[in-house]
Structure formats: C-alpha cells, structure tokens
Image (cartoon, grey):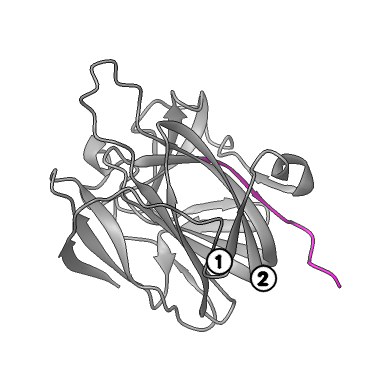
C-alpha cells in the first residue's frame, strides 16, 4: 500500500552494535561464509539510468521487489526537498509476498561509478528515469531459505572537494518472518562511499525491507546470503 506523505527532518542516526533482534557484524568475512551472492551482473552493462525493472529482479535463492503485501509505503520529504519512500507500516500479510511499486517506482540496475560494476537502485517517488528517483526508494528481499546472517554493500554520498554536499543519511532495515511478522529492525548510519554491512539475526528471517534517508540516494551491490537450508 502506498500514497501517504510524511515530512521529517533528516538526522544521522547512531546504530548500536545490537538493535531489535539484529547484531551488526563485519561484512568482509561473509564473502566466504555465505554461499549466496547477488551482484546484478546478469543484465547487459548500461550507464545510468540503466534498466528499469518494474517486475523486480530474480537471483538464485532470492527475489527482489519494492515491499511486501500488507506493508504501507509513504513519501518522506526532507527539508532540502528530497523525496524518499518511507516504510509507514512494517507488518506484512501471511504468507510473506513480494510486491513491486507503481510503474517506474520499483527498481533499476545500472553501471555505478562508485562500485565500478552493475548495482541496484531502489526507485523513489519521482520515478524512472529521473535522477531524483535513483536510490530514493524502498527495496525488499525475499529469500527461498530462512536466513540467520546476510550482508550487503551500500554506496551513499560522493566526495565533495568544496564541502557543500549534505552529509550521508542512514539505511533503515526491517526483517520479517515467513508469516509476515517483523522480527528485527535497525537504523545504520552511512558513510561517503561504500558501507559494508553484515547482519546477524537472533531468530532466522526470510525477508527484509530497506529504505534510506540519504540525500543523494543509495545504490546496492553484492548481496550475501545462504543458499543451503539452515540445519540443526
């Protein structure tokens, strides 16, 4: 569900090492610990705005969309006028079902100069192919297997020699069980450039919704997760 508008002040949030069912862990070890890897290289290389993906994106053991059935997505407008998707209601329907946004407001994949590779852009309210939409939207990940540990890299902000650019914002991650219950949530401050994020869960999850408050929007690459079923 989409459509409500909310106005907020953007603040740089401080993320504790453990918050609401999630523990932040280093990203680099996950490159060998987890056997699932989504790097968005299956599409032909294309400069921004790249490929518009109104139907989402599919990888081995994971599908990507905008949000989940039952969740409510609104629009957050910053004091600077940037418009981002905002997760207004985290509860999802049972069973957890992936949805896409309106045409031009789901996802795109393009060659990203910060990563030097193809990357995912969640598309915000301004819609594809507008620059103001790239990275301002919500993205949702639905895994085939339950996950106790995932990782991803997020690019936010760009070097600013004149020092006039707004500071990077934060990523907001909400993770859910197979029956749509929110199991864990964390707000993660972002850096200029690439932030590697590892998330360990107190209770296994099967889906995540990601929004952000970065003034320039974010790009996502190298999603790490487990392909084989959890045992024990």
Quarter of the N terminus within the rendering:
bottom left
209, above or below 111, in the image: below
63, above or below 151, in the image: below
Sort mark 1 into few (<14), some (14-19) or many (20+) by Cα contacts within 10 Å. Answer: many
Q: Quadrant of residue 5?
A: bottom left
Residue at which label 2 appears:
204
181, above or below 13, in the image: below
Magenta part of the protein: which range? 221-232
Residue at which label 1 appears:
207
CB-based contact (under 8 Å), mark 2 and mark 1? no
**Which residue is at a point 55% across and 66% down the rendered structure image?**
207
Q: Pick the residue in front: 75 or 96.
A: 75
Q: Position of residue 129 (x, y in %)?
A: 27, 38
Which label belongs to residue 185? none
Sort mark 2 into few (<14), some (14-19) or many (20+) by Cα contacts within 10 Å. Answer: many
Q: Position of residue 48 (x, y in %)?
A: 36, 29
**Which residue is at a point 29% across and 15% down the rendered structure image?**
161
Quick check: is 230 in the magenta stretch? yes
Inspect this view and state whether residue 102 appears: no
């Amino acid at each position: 569900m989409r459509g409500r508008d909310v106005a907020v002040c953007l603040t740089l949030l401080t993320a504790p090492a453990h918050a609401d069912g999630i523990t932040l862990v280093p990203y680099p070890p996950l490159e060998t610990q987890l056997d699932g890897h989504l790097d968005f290289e299956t599409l032909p290389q294309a400069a921004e705005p790249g490929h518009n993906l109104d139907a989402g994106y599919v990888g081995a053991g994971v599908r990507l969309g905008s949000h989940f059935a039952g969740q409510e997505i609104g629009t957050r407008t910053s004091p600077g006028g940037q418009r981002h998707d905002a997760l207004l209601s985290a509860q999802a329907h049972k069973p957890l079902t992936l949805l896409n946004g309106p045409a031009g407001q789901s996802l795109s994949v393009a060659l990203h100069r910060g990563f030097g590779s193809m990357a995912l852009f969640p598309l915000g309210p301004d819609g594809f192919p507008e620059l103001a939409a790239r990275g301002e939207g919500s993205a949702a990940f639905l895994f085939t297997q339950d996950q106790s540990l995932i990782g991803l890299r997020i690019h936010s902000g760009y070097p600013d020699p004149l020092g006039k650019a707004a500071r990077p914002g934060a990523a907001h991650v909400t993770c859910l069980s197979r029956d749509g219950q929110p199991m864990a949530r964390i707000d993660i401050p972002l850096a200029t450039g690439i932030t590697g994020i590892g998330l360990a869960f107190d209770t296994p999850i099967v889906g995540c919704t990601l929004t952000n408050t970065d003034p320039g929007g974010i790009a996502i690459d190298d999603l790490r997760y487990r392909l084989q079923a959890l045992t024990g």
